[in-house]
Amino acid sequence: MSTHISYTVESPIPAYSASECSESEYDPNDERWDDWEEETQDSKCLFCKDLFNVTTELFQHCKERHGFDFQALRVELKLDFYQSIRLINYIRNQVLNNSELENTESYSIPDIQTIISDDTYLKPVHEDDPLLYAFDSTDIDEFDVNIPSEKLIDYDDQEALSASLNITTPLEHELLKRLRIVEDKLFNTEVQLRKTENQFEEYRNMVKESFFDSYFDAESEKSVNSLKLTSKYETNDYYFNSYAKNDIHEEMLKDRIRTESYRDFIYENKDLFKDKIVLDVGCGTGILSMFAAKAGASKVFSVDKSAIIFRAKDIVKENKLDDVITLFNGKIEDVVLPVQKVDIIISEWMGYFLFFEGMLDSLIIARDRLLAPDGIIAPSHNRLLFAAIEDEELFNDTLNFWNDVYGFKMTAMKRPIHTSAIIDYVASDSLISDAVSIKEIPLHTIRKSQLNFTSPFTLEISRDGTVHGFLGYFDTWFTRDGHCISLTQNVNDKIDGVTSFTTGPQGGITHWRQTIFLLEHGIHVKKGTMIIGTIDCHKSIENYRDLDFEICYSIVKVGEDPKCAITHKQNFYLR
């Protein structure tokens, strides 16, 4: 059961503090770690860019300006040190991925219990965030501290103590009582301060050892591998860094269905490319750009934010195409081309389940800003399809394996599998229903607001068997004029001027594979049974390049009234 806590006020406070470490604790020659105990830095608001040198003022700003009362929330939920760290980093991460939150006047947190328990959010969003080392001192006495019994004042013995001190008047008794209360509070504070200092030290060491060491040697292969493991939600750097490595490009280039489809469309339609200006969004090694140049394009602008662009420049020069192809290192959203408009945009933007990695957003921005009114996009149309599968071997290997592991039950290990979409190959004979379209993507007209969607589906079971899960894959078309593909048109239909391919199990193997949603339990079905439901697909709030799903479905037996069928629901994610 998820918890949704909302604090509506008017405005928040900036808080941020550098994860500074004393140089002497790690490397006396390492100047990257400042002496955080002696230096104080302004903390940045959790939402906007305002800076504060007093943490309490920062949180008051968050409350009044952005409608988020961090201190009240922390007291209400009795958040400990690490839970508070996770909460701060979660908010930082959301703001990083959604700049509109900088101006928010009201902010709420869904499913907060999951967030404050997720160690992913122990990683600071910013390497130097002073707030992570300052916030705890603002409310040092808000939580009870267990004080050893031998340290507590024995007020039952106060009469003897008064006698020993020769205290006789009511005023002296009252002063002694107040002195003891103050001493108790001082001890309480000392205990909490010592605990906080230890937590600071522990957290600081953990951050340096687990997260930041990899940043300081970006040229090292070890660093890149470490970064992959520790920055799951690094929405920009991690994504682009992953495309700087050879292996991912080798896999894509060796995907003949993918690469040859682009090549065939370009080479078979050279009249479209002759003397045209072409933009390649996310060019990688530059293979599509070189196809376009060979097809007669007068100029090709190739854009990629990844470091692969520097090898692409060498590749282009090696093939003597540098007089036609100009390469830009940067995001298409930021790059300024030397032309106002381009005639053709080519891009291999598709991810798992089509939308994974969120590159379509960038293509839409490039289209709206740079494509000429009569220009074309290649590919021009995609179709996302959905089907039911029967795959007992996959089901057993993935789920039932945990029922008996060397004589022990490990069913707790099933929990992540029940929610994690699987990327794998499925045999064509695993399909136990027809495949239906759940999303049409006409690339000339699709809008960013349409990329999150909820679609109904109705699947008809084609044989007796067991449904173990659902399957997602996509078909792709290249057309000369960018027209929409009719639902009646199949990816295998041969049409002049049209090139197409499928990533489904009935086609050849591609690096996209298929996306599998395993059910918690297999469902026995008869031929003619209908599965009626909806699939909701939207970008993750933690990282817009990831996907979250909700699949609701009912099994309607032959001759049964659909209204009588039980509705099932299962959530998945793709990371």
Image (tube, grey):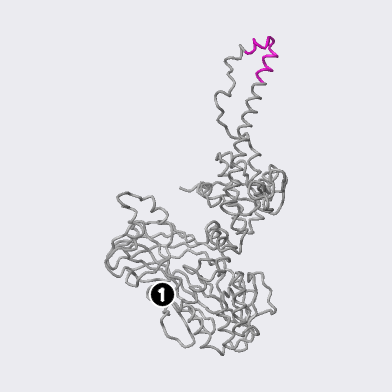
Q: Which residues are magenta?
A: 161-178
Q: Residue at x 64, y 37 (%)?
A: 139
Could you tell whether 35 is left or right of 410 in the image?
right
| Residue 11 visible in image | no
Residue 153 x, y percent position in the rendering:
59, 21
In this rendering, the count of numbered labels is 1
Within the magenta stretch, is there residue 175? yes
What's under tag 1, amino acid-wise?
Answer: Ile
Looking at the image, residue 281 lies above or below residue 404 = below
Residue 520 x, y percent position in the rendering:
36, 56
- Out of 133 and 390, give the one closest to the viewer: 133
Could you tell whether 198 is left or right of 519 in the image?
right
Could you tell whether 534 is left or right of 318 in the image?
left
- Out of 170 and 489, give the one closest to the viewer: 170
- Out of 45 and 444, give the one closest to the viewer: 45
Within the magenta stretch, is there residue 447? no
- Out of 452 and 179, give the one closest to the viewer: 179
Q: Residue at x 42, y 60 (%)?
A: 551
Residue 9 x, y percent position in the rendering:
64, 46
Residue 62 x, y percent position in the rendering:
66, 47
Looking at the image, residue 52 lies above or below residue 173 = below
Mark 1 — residue?
509
Looking at the image, residue 134 lies above or below residue 414 = above
SS type, badge 1? loop
Q: Majority secondary structure of the magenta segment?
A: helix
| Residue 537 visible in image | yes
